[in-house]
Amino acid sequence: MPGARELMQSSTCHKKFFSFLIWRSYCQHVASGIQGYNTSFNPTRRALDRADNEFELIGPKASFHGSALKLEDAPKLKLPEVAFIGRTSVGKSSLINAILNRKKFVKTSKKPGHTRLVNFFNINSKMYLVDLPGYGYVEGLGSKRGTEHFVKVAETYLRERAGKELRSVCLLIDGKVGVKKSDLIAFEMMGEFGGPFQVILTKMDKLPKPRHQAVIEEIYKIKEKFSLDNCFPHVFAVSSTEKTGLSELRYFISLNVGLKNSENW
Ligand SMILES: Nc1nc2c(ncn2[C@@H]2O[C@H](COP(=O)(O)OP(=O)(O)OP(=O)(O)O)[C@@H](O)[C@H]2O)c(=O)[nH]1
Ligand SMILES: [Mg+2]
């Protein structure tokens, strides 16, 4: 992704992007309240079924709140939110549909760079799921301008929502393509950003089963390399088309937004 490193590492971007120290301590507090944050993630079948049931109930009640380029346009209603970040075409919008068990609720496209704004989806007034533009190649803009757009929008979003409604960020990595240079920069960014995030490997249906573990291991190595202590230890692996790995993610989101208190599950 030519120019991305320079862009993401430009001093103004970094200064703004990483000035979340207060939020960091807040997030560590939130994260420590999530069952399994420091241990292995091993929800019971019963808990996963409950999460599926919960999303089955709230999925049909999800509605599009609106798009924001400037965060003044973000929802005024205060609800916990979970955001989705990743390269263009990694499957962010498709994953939101899959989590909600909806087919065309969020617009998806084969053309990279379809989502250009910060889109807020109100999930039955219990939470917002937030779809962000991707980094990397954008149809019609190219890689450099596409990434500039991402940095501008995502940085504003993360800065504005830090310490407020944002509970967690899902960083999506294409399981078939693997970790690209731009993803490494995103890892670095998230590490310095400091708020809780988790890695979601997408499009696992495109990858032969025997290779799944190797891709997961690659993520563990990167987490270790960057000493990402704000990254949830478990790596989620999903397929939105085959609908696999979704129960774990639904359960995790439920905990993140306080939909269910872990003791009740
Ligand atoms: N095989 C497969 N294809 C997927 C999966 N998830 C998404 N796709 C496809 O990947 C393409 C991009 O999906 P989107 O959900 O629009 O990706 P995005 O990350 O929102 O992309 P931008 O908005 O452009 O940043 C679409 O053609 C989807 O059908 C998956 O789990 N498996
Ligand atoms: Mg999208």
Image (cartoon, rainbow, N blue to C red):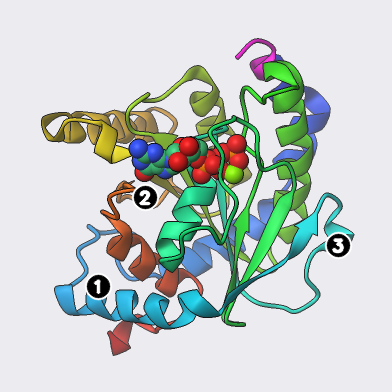
Range shown magenta = 1-5
Residue 111 image point, x, y percent: 59, 30
Per the picture, the main secondary structure of the magenta-coloured stretch is: loop
Residue 110 in sight from this viewpoint: yes
Eye-nearest disc, 2 or 1 = 2
Q: Nearer the viewer, residue 160 or 63?
A: 63
* Earlier sequence position, callout 3 versus callout 2: 3
Residue 172 in sight from this viewpoint: no
Vertically, is 24 above or below 263? above
* Earlier sequence position, callout 2 versus callout 1: 1
- Residue positioned 28% across, 81% down in the render: 50
Which residue in the rendered view is the most extreme toward the top? 2
Q: Are marks 2 and 1 in contact (CB under 8 Å)?
A: no
The verdict on residue 4 being magenta is yes
Gap in angstroms between the C-alphas marked 3 and 2: 29 Å
Residue on which the image places disc 3: 73
Residue 120 image point, x, y percent: 68, 62
- Residue positioned 41% across, 75% down in the render: 55
Which residue in the rendered view is the most extreme toward the front? 104
Residue on which the image places disc 2: 240
Quadrant position of residue 216: top left
- Residue positioned 27% across, 84% down in the render: 265
Residue 44 image point, x, y percent: 17, 73
In the image, taking residue 84 as reference, residue 118 lies left or right, namely right
Residue on which the image places disc 1: 48
The kind of residue on which mark 2 rests is Ser
The kind of residue on which mark 3 rests is Asp
Q: What SS does tag 1 mark? A: helix
Q: Around disc 3, counting alpha carbons within 10 Å, would you say few (fewer than 14), some (14 to 19), or many (20 or more)?
A: few
The kind of residue on which mark 1 rests is Leu
* Earlier sequence position, callout 1 versus callout 3: 1
